[in-house]
Image: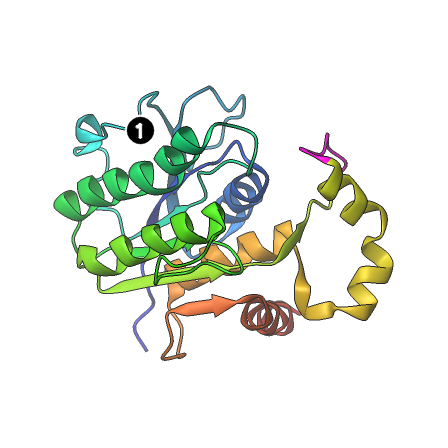
Amino acid sequence: MTPTSPKRLVLVGATGMVGGYALRYALENAAVGTVTAIVRGKLGISHPNLQEVLHRDFADCSSLSRVLSGQDAAVFCLGTYTGAVSDTEFRRITVDYTIEFARVLHGSTPNAAFSFLSGSGADPTGRSRIAFARYKGEAENALLATGFPRVYLFRPAYIYPVEPRKEPNFSYRLLRAIYPAFQLLFPNQVIRADDLARAMVDVAVQGTDRGAKVFENRDIRAMVKRIHRSTG
């Protein structure tokens, strides 16, 4: 069997919770040769396999075309919380930034795999009254129409932060406080941030034998179990 060459991975959203774990995991992953992190601010870390690219305006990613050339896979974790910004800005970050990055990546590397951090309840029909669901669904549709051969849409439910942080709102503070009981009662409604990140990186780099391209929270948990079994 011919050994597989290490992959070139581009990561967007490395300063966020899930993106941060994805960065750490990718840098430790033997299947990944280089990680190109597209960031708006410096990461503050160095690694021989890390290329940090500062890019402040995701409304226009044209200048990234050369950096994105020759990449094997992308993990896109850029986003914001509902209520943290205006509805207009929320849609811009959730939909427009995703579409613009995907446009330039596809122009530079049309055969790249793409893992996208969506969310539980994402509505591709656009009929949901919930902005988060509509916008994530809109972004999903756009990615599927871009032309990448492999697009993986991850729809986690509650993402457990693992490490202490300042929670964005009361709902998240409450969920963190009751997480032990919530996990026991509703195991398929929670996923650890580090586990989610590992699944997103692994499927982008290695692919999957699953026919579906959409991974609901239950699917992500099953994927994580397989990852843990294979790594001992």
Give the mark count.
Answer: 1
Q: Which residue is mark 1?
A: 58
Q: Quadrant of residue 206?
A: bottom left
Identify the residue at horizontal 40%, vertical 73% (top origin): 208
- Vertical order, 137 against 28 (above or below): below
Identify the residue at horizontal 44%, vertical 57% (top origin): 128
Residue 111 magenta-highlighted: no
Percent from the top left, x then y, of residue 100? Answer: 24, 38
Relative to 115, is 173 on the left or the right? Answer: right
Identify the residue at horizontal 55%, vertical 71% (top origin): 223
Instruction: Identify the element where label 1 is drawn.
Output: loop
Percent from the top left, x then y, of residue 157? Answer: 61, 58
Please name whichever residue, 61 or 32, is drawn nearer the observer in this view of the structure.
Answer: 61
Quadrant occupied by the C terminus: bottom right
Identify the residue at horizontal 51%, vertical 60% (top origin): 121
- Vertical order, 134 against 37 (above or below): below
Relative to 126, is 121 on the left or the right? Answer: right
How busy is the neighbourhood of tag 1: few (under 14 within 10 Å), some, or many (20 plus)? Answer: many
Q: Which amino acid is tagged 1?
A: Phe
